[in-house]
Image (cartoon, rainbow, N blue to C red):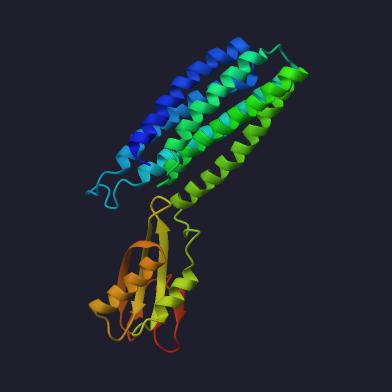
Amino acid sequence: MSQHKILIAFLLNLGFSVYELIGGTITGSTAIVSDAVHDFGDAISIGLSYLLEKKSTKQPDAKYTYGYTRYSLVGGMVTTLILLFGSTFVIFNAILRLFNPIEINYNGMIILSLIGVTVNFIAAYITRDNNSLNQKSVNLHMLEDVLGWIVVLIGAIIMRFTNISYLDPILSILVALFILKQALANFISILNVFLEKTPAQVSLEEIEKHLLNIPGVKNVHHLHIWSLDGYHNYATLHVVSNEPNIKLKQTIKSELSAHQIAHSTIEMENTNENCHDQNCKLHSIDRPHTHHCHKTK
């Protein structure tokens, strides 16, 4: 998804939040009014996501040697936090409305819902491609809106013929709980990237075993794998060999690339050389009597 598509999502979300605030007030639907406030927060966060996504494409420089990629993550974090707080806000207001019901214009609610489903489906379709956790967060906003309006539409039709007004806040709570769960999962994914947790799709043990099957590799240790944005993985490692050469290093890099490692830094060591790093035993598969780690005092 390009920055241009995020900008389109921002404009659609901002314009529609104003539209549904007016419509929700006229129809008396707490589901629509709550969603209007929620969408306004979405629009602000998506606008910020657009600016941060644009900044994240800048090339590495002396200040950011790995580039500006994680600015995209910051955008995703802000967007997801607003989703979490917005869903909580919707639940709170819906509970209040359960105890203080008001008359609802069901026909107006149905018309607003049809328009809401259409506009937000277009936005969700435009933002469907995810190349970063930030873009995934934006798309989650759009999917939330589509789902929310579908539920509001179904509820409005049912209430139109049954006059069960408390169904409106109940549906709001159900949608908000669903989005709350999705947003929390996305928040944890972003947090894991910031904490440099090993990417979920990567297995250290499997990579180490595959590297040890390469002729000339005696030991692999001090292997660290992390991600800058949740999609592009990086690795640093020590490789022990009695015959280090460019071809061997390229073979190792090719193997790492097959395991979704976009960039790797390899330190070659001889079997008679001691690794002086204090934590070199943390990740290590060793062939017997080939290499020794020396812990510093």
Depth order, front residue of 9/266 = 9
The quarter of the rendered structure image containing the C terminus is: bottom left
How many dots with numbers? 0
Q: Is residue 137 above or below residue 291?
A: above
Residue 111 vs 196, above or below: the answer is above
Residue 293 seen anywhere in this rendered image of the structure: no
* Quadrant (top left/top right/bottom left/bottom right) for the N terminus: top left
> Residue shown at 70%/19% (left/top)?
97
Residue beneath the point at 39% across and 67% down? 258
Left or right of 272: which side holds 202?
right
* Whole-percent x, y for residue 55 in the image: 30, 39
* Residue 136 position (above or below residue 41): below
Question: Is any atom of residue 153 visible in this view?
Answer: yes
Q: State whether residue 232 is above or below residue 165.
A: below
| Quarter of the image where one finds residue 29 | top right
Residue 113 occupies quadrant: top right
Residue in the image at 59% along x and 33% along y: 147
User: Most extreme residue toward the bottom, as rendered?
Assistant: 289
Expressed as whole percent of the image width and height from the top left, the position of residue 166 reads 74, 21
Residue found at x 31% / y 83%: 270
Q: Residue 84, percent across and down?
A: 56, 35
Position in image of residue 246 (x %, y %): 23, 77
Task: From the viewer's perspective, tell me whether residue 61 is left or right of residue 37.
Answer: left
In this rendered view, identify the residue nearer to me: 47 or 71. 47
